[in-house]
Image (cartoon, rainbow, N blue to C red):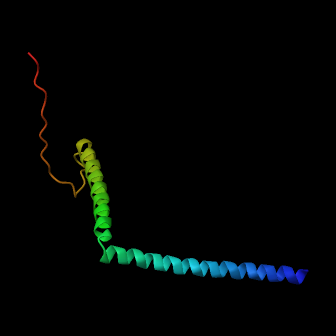
Amino acid sequence: RLYNLKIIIIIFFINIIITNQIMRIYQLYHALFILFLEKFTPVGSIIHRFRRRKFNLKRNIERDDDDRYSLYHRDTMPADSENKRYYIEYARPHN
């Protein structure tokens, strides 16, 4: 009976090891497939477009934060901020 328990435990751990190796192989093939799609099919341009859009959105949010910061702290304005002219239009008073 104890012998059977040892065999069951050994089989369990061998099963875990084999499953882990299969998952690693699957992840490798999955990564290679994604790389192939990105480089050699039109799907790559779609992926790049979404990445660019996400990067541009993040960059614009950071610029907006820099602009807000510079409005309140003129003496400690970040070095990479741009000198921008702002044209503010006010509503004309109604007579």
4 lies left or right of 76: right
Q: Residue at x 31, y 55 (%)?
A: 58
Q: Residue at x 32, y 69 (%)?
A: 43
Outermost right residue: 1
Outermost left residue: 95
Q: Residue at x 12, y 46 (%)?
A: 85
How far across and how far down the image is residue 80, in percent?
22, 58
Q: Residue at x 27, y 44 (%)?
A: 68
Quarter occupied by the N terminus: bottom right
87 lies left or right of 38: left
The total of numbered circles placed on residues is: 0
Q: Is residue 69 above or below residue 19?
A: above
How far across and how far down the image is residue 29, in percent?
47, 79
How far across and how far down the image is residue 34, in percent?
40, 74
Outermost top residue: 95
46 lies left or right of 84: right
How far across and how far down the image is residue 15, in percent?
69, 80
Closer to the camera in the image, 27 or 60 = 27
Closer to the camera in the image, 50 or 90 = 50
Quarter occupied by the C terminus: top left
